[in-house]
Amino acid sequence: MKSRAQYLTALFCAVTAVVTNIAPAAAFELKMPTKLPTPKRMAKLKYTPDVLIVVPDAKLDNDDLQETMEKVHGTVIGSMGEGDLKCLIIKTEKGQMEETEKVLTKDKKHFASVGRNYAVPSTMVPGIATNAQFASQWHLQAIHCPDAWDTATGKGVRVAVFDTGCAASNPDLAGKTNKGFDAFGAVGKITGALGMLPAVMQPGVTELAGMAAGLLGGRADQDNGAGSHGTVVATTIAATMNNSHAGVGVAPNCGIYPVRISENKSPFDKDHSYTTDIEMIAGMIHVMSKPDIRIVNISYNFPVGGFHNAALHPALHVYFKKFFYEPHHSGLVFMSAGNESFPDPTPPVPYLCVVSAVDRDGTLADRETWGSNYGPAVMFTAPGVEVGCTDKRGDETFADGTSLSCPIVAGVAALIMDKKPYAPNWEILRTMISSCKKIKGAPVFTPYYGWGMPDAYCAVTGNDPKPVIESKFSSTSSTSSKLNVSAGHAARRTKS
């Protein structure tokens, strides 16, 4: 029987919803764009000159490798991983990279893949603002997270966040953030420089076989990113409920494993952090040594030339495929679509979940300075405008970009893995797809939203969304505590 206190809690939270102007969850629906966004300015795609990334055939011996290097006048300056995870970093003669790339690519007997080391930016809109009133976490209502938390909260799941590191000192991440792995620092041991596009290479071969065990590279539980990018992404996934902060992550009880692939010093622009294929591969090799990590979030991308393009990043995709297809990994990689409002023709790959962004109106995000990329590679969408989170100082902020929609979808996957800890990745994906609400009169799959926006409640229960009053103001004991978030949120809003 419901107690008087529970009824009062429900009543208080109903008032809270009015005070904080939280849009009813049931009112949110995806809509087809009425007009396509105008593409925004795109930076020129860059890559490290005279450097190739090569995944060798497992049977390649040192003699064959040396003979090939002599033939192309190349030098192996570093290697990462061991066995079928091994990757070689090759320095070519100046101006001969393209020719060497062609020769090695044709040598299928010795080399599984050959690619360049491209630089790709983060996908959060520059200039995150601290919001004195902390914008309502409308995205949680839109995907029915409060309903889902009665069933799953991400407990027992760890998400690897490939980013600038994340601040373990942030109250929203306290006790749930490992020291992680500094892939950026580890790669510096190969290249001899900690720049995004290293121009100076140390002579000799640097072996990073120990990176799988975490023996190389520093800690990643500090945020070195411009604008707290890594911490903002991490709190979007896993911010703790019922602490002194108003914000809550999609999967508030899941753990974060930070993998530092970038820092805030960029040779390109001051607003974005950049990373390259080498850091990404180093991170993937390390994560694949952690059997309990089955979700990777990558909020870095770029239209056409981004990490989702298997043709331009063949070596990196070797590791994406291994992470997805090999049964002892059975992992999922979630990647942001990018923020250039670009119609990206890159074909999809089944092992990579690319995520676009929608706004509060339920349509493809299209703002004055940025807009969500879209195209056949997109698999899901999620809110990416005014997403409430916290930065590395612990300040409540809101942020825009596909950098936020991506971890929202990764958080839904964490909720499902909490409910189904032994389910293979294909079952997790199938559950997410089946939970997506379809757009009336639209195809099941669109280039704007992929399969649609996963619904957290439907994904963990298999049911349709509850009516909004019943779901948001549930008076069950498991839900009463989570509603304190709304109460704290209301206090902050009304004091300002």
Image (cartoon, rainbow, N blue to C red):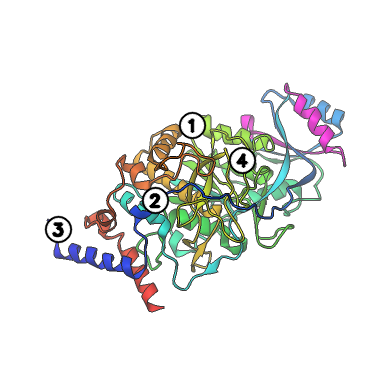
Say whether marks 4 and 3 touch (CB < 8 Å).
no
Which of disc 3 and disc 4 is earlier in sequence?
A: 3
312 or 78: nearer the viewer: 312
- For label 4, the residue is 308
Give the distance between the C-alpha atoms of the residues marked 4 and 1, in whole angstroms.
23 Å
Task: Please identify, in this view, whether the residue under mark 1 or under mark 2 is nearer the observer.
Answer: 2
Quadrant for the N terminus, please. bottom left
CB under 8 Å between discs 3 and 1:
no
**Circle 2 sits in a helix, a strand or a loop, which is it?**
loop
How far is the residue under mark 3 from the one under mark 2?
A: 27 Å
Where residue 328 is drawn, which disc sits there?
1
Is disc 1 placed on a helix, strand or loop? loop
Q: Specify the amino acid type for callout 2.
A: Ile
Q: Look at label 3 and name its amino acid.
A: Lys
Give the CA separation, mark 3 to mark 1.
46 Å
Q: Position of residue 441 (x, y in %)?
A: 42, 40
Cβ atoms under marks 4 and 1 closer than 8 Å: no
Q: Residues within 10 Å of mark 2 (few under 14, many from 20)?
A: many
Say if residue 285 shows up in the picture.
Answer: yes
Which comes sooner in the sequence, label 4 or label 2? 2
The first of marks 1 and 2 along the sequence is: 2
Comparing marks 4 and 2, which lies closer to the viewer?
Answer: 2
Between tags 3 and 2, which lies in front? 2
Relative height, residue 142 to residue 84 (above, below): below
Q: Amino acid at mark 4?
A: His
Task: State the CA–CA distance, disc 4 to disc 3.
Answer: 51 Å
Residue 312 in the image: x percent, y percent? Answer: 69, 37
Q: Which residues are magenta?
A: 82-109
